[in-house]
Image: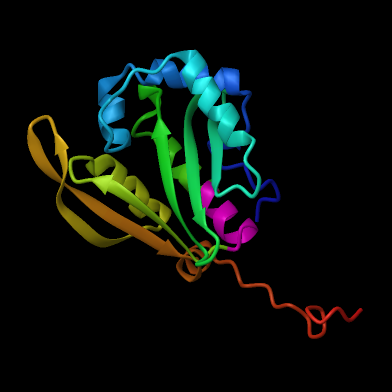
Amino acid sequence: MNTNIFLGSRVRLTAEDPAVLAEVFARWDRDAGFKRLLDDAPPMLWSVEKIKEWIDKDLKKENPRSFLFAVRTLEGDQLIGFLDLWVNWMHGDAWVGIGLGERDYWGNGFGTDAMQVMLRYAFMELNLHRVTLGVFDYNPRAQRSYAKAGFKPEGRLRRELHRQGQRRDILIMGILRSEWLEASHIEPVAVPAGVLEGEK
């Protein structure tokens, strides 16, 4: 297994300076097509300063429940998107969101690779039990990408979304740690007897 937990075959996850993220987020926010695929909020235009303020505030939180990563290509080191993981520590589960703001990288496996890296982090480092996401019914490309990463369809929120004058469905997809381990051909590591009790 790759020892760099943030490195995939095509991308790597990075921590970026808030000013860098604010610049690209403000530019991506001006792409209405990207915003309509990203989330269910109405497209909004935010200034670079306002986005930086939001990122700064989020980074200062203690005991974080949200983990934000930028996505950079291995070839050319291009900043192309982001991943965000919202964790419920009590239940060992999380919701994940992904956005590739650079259209030239859509449909070429970069998002799938980034999601696979995030799942490795979620299951091997954060020890989560499951990861869940929502995807719109009019985004089959994303649905195929999530399926390749191991997510399974779990439900449908019928007519949950109002988009461009129409009611649309939101599909729920999820993956369990056991399913990810099996698909990744990774054996769970057994803890030697006595270790948890503090024995040497």
Count of marks overlaid on the render: 0
x, y percent for residue 50: 48, 19
The colour scheme of the drawn protein is rainbow
- Dividing the picture into quadrants, the one containing residue 13 is top right
**In the depicted view, which residue is nearer to us: 37 or 51?**
51
In the visual, does 2 lie left or right of 80? right
In the visual, does 199 lie left or right of 153? right
- Location of the N terminus by quadrant is bottom right
**In the depicted view, which residue is nearer to us: 192 or 198?**
198
- Location of the C terminus by quadrant is bottom right
Would residue 124 be counted in the magenta stretch?
yes
Would residue 191 be counted in the magenta stretch?
no
Q: Does the rendering let one see residue 14?
A: no
Q: Is residue 82 above or below residue 200?
A: above
Residue farthest bottom in this picture = 193
Q: Residue at x 35, y 46 (%)?
A: 145
Q: Which residue is drawn at 49% across and 47% down?
A: 85
x, y percent for residue 60: 64, 35
Residue farthest right in this picture = 200
Q: Residue at x 19, y 55 (%)?
A: 157
| Span highlighted in magenta in the image | 118-127
Q: Is residue 114 above or below residue 147?
A: above
In the visual, does 110 lie left or right of 173? right
Q: In this view, does 80 lie above or below 148?
A: above
x, y percent for residue 64: 60, 47
x, y percent for residue 171: 24, 53
Q: Does the rendering let one see residue 125?
A: yes
In the visual, does 173 lie left or right of 1? left
Please name the predominant secondary structure of the magenta segment in the image: helix
Q: Residue at x 62, y 72 (%)?
A: 188
Q: Is residue 56 above or below residue 109?
A: above
